[in-house]
Image (tube, rainbow, N blue to C red):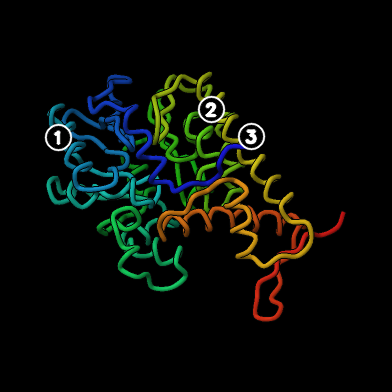
Amino acid sequence: MPRPVELLKNNVNALSSMQSQKLQKLSNNVYVVPGRTNAGVLIVDDNECVVIDTGIDEDSGRRIFNAVKSLNLKIRAIVNTHHHADHIGGNALIVKRSGATVYATPEDKPFIERPVLEPLYLFGSFPPKLLRTKLLEAEGVPVRDLDDLRREVGFEAMPLPGHTMGMVGISYGNVLFTADAFFPVDIIQKYGAPYHLNVKSALESLRKLLEVVGKFEYVVPAHGNVLRPPEAISVINENLNAINRLRDFVLNNISDSVMLEELIMKIFSSLGISIDSPHNYLLNRSALLSYIAWLSDDGLLTINAVGNKLLVSRLKA
């Protein structure tokens, strides 16, 4: 079985060789700025546009800003599909240069305004400085409710929870931006199943996408190449299969009762995961906990405190 959840930002780095930095035109009013995190450009009138996601840092924001400038457009607004650092890291630079307003869902809005919340929830307390890097914490900016912009501009926001609680896809004309709902096949083959905060919700979002991607001419994942619907369906199915494989693998690694942290380390070892940094450990741990929570909610596991330890036990059929 391939290695499972790996640090999301390593996945992103692995994609860099696949991307160019030129604008890709998908229709008269939709462009993509390819990169480690693909950015969308929605032209909303003769001289203004909305940018979808801004990459991991100021360099990403600068590249997106300059790409839009080459189209003689002003950035009116930024839509963050979700709050992860590799999607919001260019916000501050673009806001300073253009005066754009940032929009997101109510669920993800607090994390974009106060990005320290991301390393905070992964660590379980206020995070040490070693976790407060651009991989986990961007510069915060004020955020307005996404519905306000949706009503003004006319795009559609599709709830795709799972990767984060409030992640959305954005459709505009014949193009659907799918955020981090799914990842390229080569990433799945290399790492197994990518990070999801709520993997059960992520699975439901993938099934929803299978029903709708055929209505569009182009499907734009945040990481990887622009896809036609048949290609997107194939990749989505690979992601679905990877999630189900890892769920079964986690369950099959619990024969009786085991300490939670021992179980996590056992799964890391069984799947060949090499932990090389604190944030890598915390992201992998968080991802595996999502599977454990899912199995518990489905009545296949119990989680109890015994002797000052959390014990995970498999329920007998």
Q: Which residue is mark 3?
A: 241
Query: Which residue sits at x=71%, y=72%?
Result: 304
Instruction: Label 1, secondary structure: give it.
Output: helix
Give the camera-side residue of 304 and 211: 304
Quarter occupied by the N terminus = top right
Instruction: Label 3, secondary structure: give it.
Output: helix
Instruction: Label 2, secondary structure: give it.
Output: helix
Q: Decide if residue 200 is in sight here.
A: no
Task: From the top left corner, tell me how far across and down residue 255 is, in percent.
Answer: 78, 56
Q: Quadrant of residue 133?
A: bottom left
Earlier in the chain: of badge 1 and badge 2, it is 1
Q: Which residue is mark 1?
A: 66
| Label 3 to label 2: alpha-carbon separation | 10 Å
Q: Is residue 282 left or right of residue 25?
A: right
Q: Is residue 129 left or right of residue 206?
A: left
Residue type at mark 2 is Val
Task: From the top left corner, tell me how far across and down residue 157 is, in percent.
Answer: 43, 40
Earlier in the chain: of badge 3 and badge 2, it is 2
Q: Quadrant of residue 32?
A: top left
Give the camera-side residue of 182 and 129: 129
Query: Which residue sits at x=19%, y=47%?
Result: 58
